[in-house]
Amino acid sequence: MKKQFILLGDASGELRRAIQTSGPIALSASPPLALVAPTVTSSSFLETMFNPNQVKAVLDAVRREIAVEYVYDPASIQEEQVKSTLINALVAFQLAKPTRWFEKYWFRTDDSGQIESSSHDLGMIHISHPNPSLAYQQHHMVTLEDVELVKSCLPRVLHALYPAPSGSWGHPSGPVHRALIMFAQAYLMEAFGELGQFIWAMALDSLFASKTDSRKRGSYTIVPRLRTLHGTEFEPYKFVSVPGHQRRPEHKLWAIGEDIFKLRNAVAHGLPIPDAWLTPHGQPIYEGYAYQLAECTEILLRKTLLLIMKDQRLFDVFVDSKKLDKYFG
């Protein structure tokens, strides 16, 4: 038997204690996924690259973390399929509570806990202290409540992300599949920062635009449909916990919906961002309206996907073009 892991990162104290006291938390029976405190004994793989002190520091860092684990027989399932399933499971965690280590630290062990292979970044885990992707996420910690949310979403997330023979273009979950891919991809674009807003807005477009009527596309259709689903008075920042030392206006969906797509279009067409939208010089980046629109786009997409993943009826609406137009009128 083999084991593959992806480290969760930013696990709360209560979650760590629960696993240390009661053992692994089952996430899914099929595929067999669980949250565990990884047991690693050594790593001949790491020893080829680092000195003994560095290897010890890496292994100690890994042992302090919580990971999603997949135990499998390599004779019955391909290694890449196991890794892909782990990554897809992590998307469910990112929907529930975005953290700094998304898809960053993966490794495989043998029966004895010896690391046989790992992501390139694992060797730097003991000295890596990444910032959150968005400022509002600064204090995010994955809690037991978040784990329960993941459990409720995981079956549909795995279903929507399962590879199709024709790839994303012909995937049976269509718009939902693509939106999940875009949600995750924006988090992997560390070098591009807030430009992830463009990807998240495109994901909203994929979900809400009509697939059968070309007159029902663009922001003049997507924004009203967002309002129907979430409510005109929906305030994105009330859906999340903003750190106490950071300030955010009480943005409401009816006021910012069109601006989200104006910002998306400005990026898509190489247009300038209005000066009034930019962060004033010398101020924290989250003081700028454009940055706040980026955060609100992510929050709207994440809340939308969570609703879809928790409700089979709503999932069926968003993967069926006729049902989508009938639902929103």
Image (cartoon, rainbow, N blue to C red):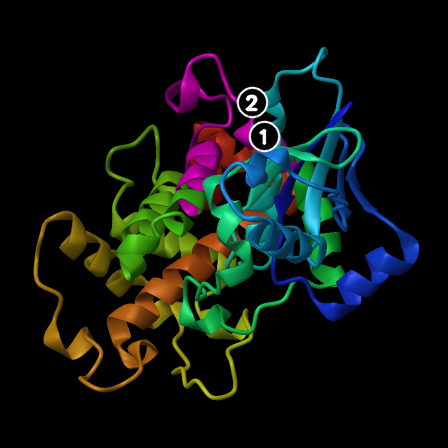
Splitting the image into 4 quarters, where does residue 159 fall? top right
In the rendered view, tell whether residue 40 sits above or below residue 19: above
**What span is in magenta?**
156-183
Splitting the image into 4 quarters, where does residue 75 fall? top right
What's the residue type where badge 1 is placed? Answer: Lys
Q: Name the residue: 77% across, 62% down.
A: 16
What's the residue type where badge 2 is placed? Answer: Glu
Is residue 227 in sight in this rendering?
A: no
Q: Name the residue: 63% across, 38% down.
A: 313
* Quadrant position of the C terminus in the picture: top left
Q: Where residue 25 sits in the image (x, y, percent)?
A: 82, 48
Mark 1–mark 2 contact, CB under 8 Å? Answer: yes
In the shown orientation, is residue 217 left or right of residue 111?
left
Q: Where residue 207 sits in the image (x, y, percent)?
A: 41, 41
Q: Name the residue: 90% across, 59% down.
A: 21
**Front residue of this view, candidates 114 and 167:** 114
Q: Name the residue: 53% across, 75% down.
A: 238
Q: Which residue is mark 1?
A: 83
Determine crowd level at label 2: few under 14, some 14-19, many 20+ residues with C-alpha closer than 10 A: few
- Label 1 to label 2: alpha-carbon separation: 5 Å
Q: Where residue 8 sits in the image (x, y, percent)?
A: 62, 52
* Quadrant position of the N terminus in the picture: top right
In the shown orientation, is residue 36 left or right of residue 184?
right
Q: Which residue is mark 2?
A: 80
